[in-house]
């Protein structure tokens, strides 16, 4: 049964210079699991908002063509009426929690549909059990972590049992464990019912294996519509920034790309390429500098952070950062990463222990927009700082008119100041800098960070980014450091905190990136031939 | 300074009545200018906060309310040239000319300042003691005009507090000179509106708009029985309202600022002030069934 039917849809936001969606024609059937792919600004979010009716009813703008969802034309029916058919989940869980407890939140949609109290109560309980949030139901939402909030928001979306659910980067704020769980949960719900799922994601390696179909958007137009395998072939040829690490690994090995770790391993096995016995390490740096850094610039000495009437967020953290070092802080939501960075920058004081820095600690918090308070880019940072982050030509623009990646670079300029005056013992800390970024923007950020002489510490949930950028990875759990070693060690051995390439090769050789994995496989092939 | 679920008579009252009670207090503050009556409203609000278990939050609000009150009083005293009783002569000042401070302008400024401070305190009491979830549901049933308005009415204070904290942290991390307070204020306001729009979008996609239509069509109703606290605070609000109207009609609490100050604190004024405090605080005496 056709659930969503889009014909000749062209849409422009108010005062926008170009159309966000252009001449879109597509249908989505019930029970389909569709992944929306595309670079930032390609129109993914707008398409989801058109299906939910927020476009044009909430955002305004000009629209041509039609969108029918469950038989309702979105031009005639607003998002409130469409909510009976469509559930929507956006990126930021904080703005999607409108009530005080998860129980109220889950009951809100069913109540709005006019269900009776017993039916609402049953919907709440069943949804909570399905999402494993039954223990959270009566806790104040202010006490929930980001991952818990996102599950509650998903529950609120699903409790009214929509026929189609639209999700806009729902895993962008989740740690790898919670992200994988969420995708698995969506797939299970999709299989258990006829609910269609339309999921926009940047980290395609996370969700392609679960998808039935991929839609790729470019500049608001439908550039690809087909199965995940065909999408990867298309992306390799036409849009390399959308290719998953696993597909790059397979393509580099001369194999056709397939989605998912399991299928990639099978493809390698059937081609006789097995890295599981590889002995050699790929670019495994020495750990000696970690144990006794000769030029230490930041030091955490038994740092505790204990909340009054609450838990301890940090529990005796000992950590030393050397000059010029590149460190990734990883761990689950609530592990203490952001708190640790805040202590480094002096925004928080330890309840026990000591943080000492040889120089300035610059911290870029999660939302770059919080730094942007002036009317022009020029007002946010001086000319030298703007030039260093490549924004000199945009000096007269309003900061809020910049793209997400440009805003982040501007915030970085505001935090760092004139790069010529940066002392060698400065430490730059970034909290989740790749949230909601596509691969092209991430690579730009890596280039920018690599150009700095300072030590850089990044808290991230993105193993691919950590592998590309960091030489050392510190893994936190429950406020403690549970692993502190070279990136090739930490990111190659596990299931969740590991890159896709490492998972495909099962950690062999410490290869983290597709290029390293391909080199490893080629080396093995040569050895086998000899 | 956002709502926390805690036991208390005001918290146990249905949102519609609690809002009416707060609005009545605000109406008294807006209509009465006699300092004794305004003082009675201030005492009532602070005592209500203590009896509702949110005295600490109200005390925090005083940190903003007192400077606000003093600023308004000072500005009115310096700017207004009405009043006949000169208490300070500045002589000729550049730009503003002859500046004399009068007793009338000073007292009237203090009244204006006290009124602003009391309204701020009532706003705080509403934010921390009235469940925003219930307010949201109430607006839904009352066919409130838009999800955005509902969002601003119920979520403005917590969102503003959270965002301003984040913004302040970000500004502490900047290199060089920090931005001015005006720039920060503008950014916070713009940010709150953005966030309110996001939350309003969420309300829409959860079917809030459709619920309004159902409410208009009378398709679905909840009938919660009226609790003792609902009845108590409703009676209190009506009594305060009647008293305020009576005071206005009978002229029990006269106040004239200009040209000569006249603010008698006779038996009728003191009696009206005392009655106001008693009417407002009586429902707090009953603590049976205060946990919802």
Image (tube, rainbow, N blue to C red):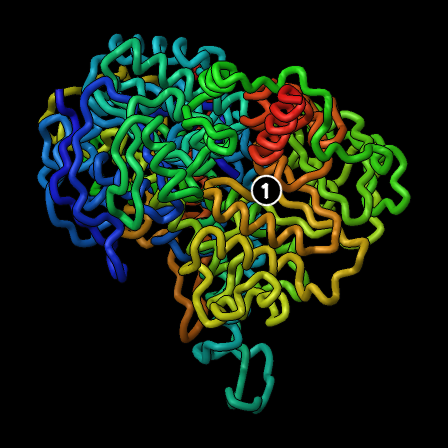
Q: Nearer the viewer, residue A269 or A491?
A: A269
Q: Residue at x 70, y 31 (%)?
A: A282
- In the picture of the structure, the residue carrying the numbered disc 1 is B59
Q: Position of residue B174 (x, y in %)?
A: 64, 58
**Residue B225 placed where, x, y %?**
27, 15
- In what quadrant of the picture does the N terminus of chain A appear? top left
Q: Classify 10 Å Cα crowding around label 1: few (below 14), some (14-19), many (20 and above).
A: some
Q: Nearer the viewer, residue A53 or A495?
A: A495
Q: Is residue B200 visible?
A: yes
Q: Residue at x 38, y 43 (%)?
A: A239
Q: Is residue A250 shown left or right of residue A280?
A: left
Left or right relative to A30: residue B217:
left
Residue drawn 86% across the image and 34% down it: A288
Q: Examine the image and state in which quarter residue A512 appears.
A: top right
Q: Secondary structure at mark 1?
A: helix
Q: Please tell me how many numbered marks the rendered image carries.
A: 1
Horizontal and vertical percent position of residue A235:
37, 38
Instruction: Decide if residue B72 is on the left or right side of residue B232.
Output: right
Instruction: Give the residue at the far front of this rendering.
Output: A530
Above or below: residue A159 compared with residue B21: above
Q: On what subunit does the disc labeled 1 rest?
A: B
Q: Tell which of A185 and A398 is nearer to you.
A: A185
> Is residue A138 something that shows in the picture?
no
Where in the figure is residue A422, as x and y percent of width and height? 75, 61
Task: Depth check: give the residue in front, A388 or A165.
Answer: A388
* Residue shown at the point (63%, 37%) measured from the top left: A459
With A77 as the anchor, is A266 left or right in this view?
right
For residue B101, above or below residue B26: below
């Amino acid at each position: 049964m056709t659930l969503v039917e889009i014909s000749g849809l062209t849409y422009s936001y108010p005062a926008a210079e170009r159309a966000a969606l252009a001449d879109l024609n597509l249908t989505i059937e019930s029970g389909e699991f569709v992944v929306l792919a595309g670079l930032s600004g390609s129109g993914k979010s707008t398409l989801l908002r058109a299906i939910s009716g927020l476009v044009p009813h909430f955002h305004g703008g000009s629209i041509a063509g039609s969108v029918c969802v469950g038989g309702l034309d979105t031009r005639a029916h607003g998002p409130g009426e469409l909510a009976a058919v469509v559930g929507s989940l956006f990126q930021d869980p904080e703005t999607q929690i409108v009530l005080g407890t998860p129980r109220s939140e889950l009951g809100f949609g069913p109540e709005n549909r006019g269900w009776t109290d017993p039916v609402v109560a049953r919907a709440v309980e069943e949804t909570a059990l399905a999402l494993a949030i039954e223990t959270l139901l009566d806790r104040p939402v202010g006490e929930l972590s980001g991952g818990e909030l996102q599950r509650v928001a998903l529950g609120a979306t699903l409790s009214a049992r929509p026929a189609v659910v639209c999700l806009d980067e729902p895993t962008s704020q989740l740690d790898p464990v919670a992200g994988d769980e969420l995708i698995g949960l969506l797939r299970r719900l999709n299989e258990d019912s006829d609910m269609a799922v339309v999921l926009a994601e940047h980290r395609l390696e996370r969700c392609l294996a679960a998808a039935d179909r991929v839609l790729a958007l470019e500049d608001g137009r439908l550039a690809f519509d087909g199965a995940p395998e065909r999408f990867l072939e298309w992306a390799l040829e036409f849009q390399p920034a959308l290719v998953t690490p696993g597909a790059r690994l397979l393509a580099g090995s001369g194999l056709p790309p397939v989605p998912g770790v399991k299928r990639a391993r099978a493809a390698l096995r059937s081609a006789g390429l097995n890295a599981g016995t590889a002995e050699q390490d790929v670019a495994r740096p020495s750990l000696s500098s970690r144990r006794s850094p000769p030029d230490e610039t930041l030091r955490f000495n038994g740092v505790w952070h204990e909340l009054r009437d609450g838990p301890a967020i940090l529990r005796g953290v000992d950590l030393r950062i050397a000059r010029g070092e590149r460190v990734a802080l990883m761990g689950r939501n609530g592990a203490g990463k952001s708190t640790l960075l805040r202590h480094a920058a002096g925004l928080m004081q330890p309840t026990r222990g000591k943080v000492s820095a040889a120089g300035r600690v610059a911290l870029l918090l999660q939302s770059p927009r919080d730094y942007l308070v002036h009317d022009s880019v020029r007002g946010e940072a001086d000319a030298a700082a703007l030039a260093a982050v490549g924004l000199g030509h945009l000096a007269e623009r309003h900061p809020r008119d910049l793209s997400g990646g440009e805003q982040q670079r501007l915030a970085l300029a505001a935090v760092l100041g004139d790069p010529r005056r940066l002392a060698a013992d400065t430490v730059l800390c970034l909290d989740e800098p790749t949230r909601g970024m596509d691969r092209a923007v991430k690579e730009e950020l890596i280039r920018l960070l690599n150009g700095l002489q300072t030590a850089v510490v990044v808290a991230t949930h993105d193993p691919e980014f950590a592998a590309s950028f960091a030489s050392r990875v510190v893994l936190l759990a429950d406020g403690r450091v549970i692993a502190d070693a070279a990136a090739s060690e930490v990111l190659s051995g596990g299931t969740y905190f590991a890159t896709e390439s490492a998972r495909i090769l099962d950690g062999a050789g410490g290869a983290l990136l597709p290029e390293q994995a391909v080199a490893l496989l080629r080396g093995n092939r040569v050895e086998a031939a000899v | 300074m956002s709502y926390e679920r805690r036991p208390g008579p005001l918290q146990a009252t249905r949102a519609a009545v609690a809002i009416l009670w707060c609005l009545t207090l605000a109406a008294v503050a807006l209509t009465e200018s006699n300092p004794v009556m305004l003082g009675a409203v201030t005492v009532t609000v602070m005592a209500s906060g203590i009896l509702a278990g949110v005295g600490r939050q109200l005390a925090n609000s005083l940190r903003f309310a007192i400077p606000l009150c003093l600023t308004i009083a000072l500005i009115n005293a310096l700017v207004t040239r009405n009043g006949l009783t000169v208490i300070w002569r500045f002589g000729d000042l550049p730009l503003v000319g002859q500046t004399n401070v009068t007793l009338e302008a000073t007292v009237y400024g203090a009244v204006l300042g006290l009124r602003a401070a009391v309204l701020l305190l009532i706003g705080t009491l509403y934010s921390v003691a009235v469940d925003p979830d219930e307010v949201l549901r109430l607006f839904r049933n009352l066919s409130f005009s838009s999800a955005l308005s509902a969002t601003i009415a119920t979520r403005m204070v917590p969102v503003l507090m959270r965002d301003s904290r984040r913004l302040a942290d970000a500004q502490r991390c900047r290199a060089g000179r920090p931005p001015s307070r005006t720039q920060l204020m503008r950014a916070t306001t713009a940010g709150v509106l953005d966030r309110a729009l996001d939350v309003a979008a969420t309300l829409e996609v959860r079917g809030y708009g459709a619920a309004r239509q159902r409410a208009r069509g009378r398709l679905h109703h909840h009938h919660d029985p009226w609790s003792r606290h609902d009845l108590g605070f409703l009676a209190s609000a009506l009594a305060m309202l009647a008293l305020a109207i009576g005071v206005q009609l009978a002229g029990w609490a006269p106040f004239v600022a200009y040209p000569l100050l006249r603010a008698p604190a006779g038996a009728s004024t003191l009696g009206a002030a005392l009655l106001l405090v008693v009417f407002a605080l009586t429902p707090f005496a009953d603590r049976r069934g205060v946990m919802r």
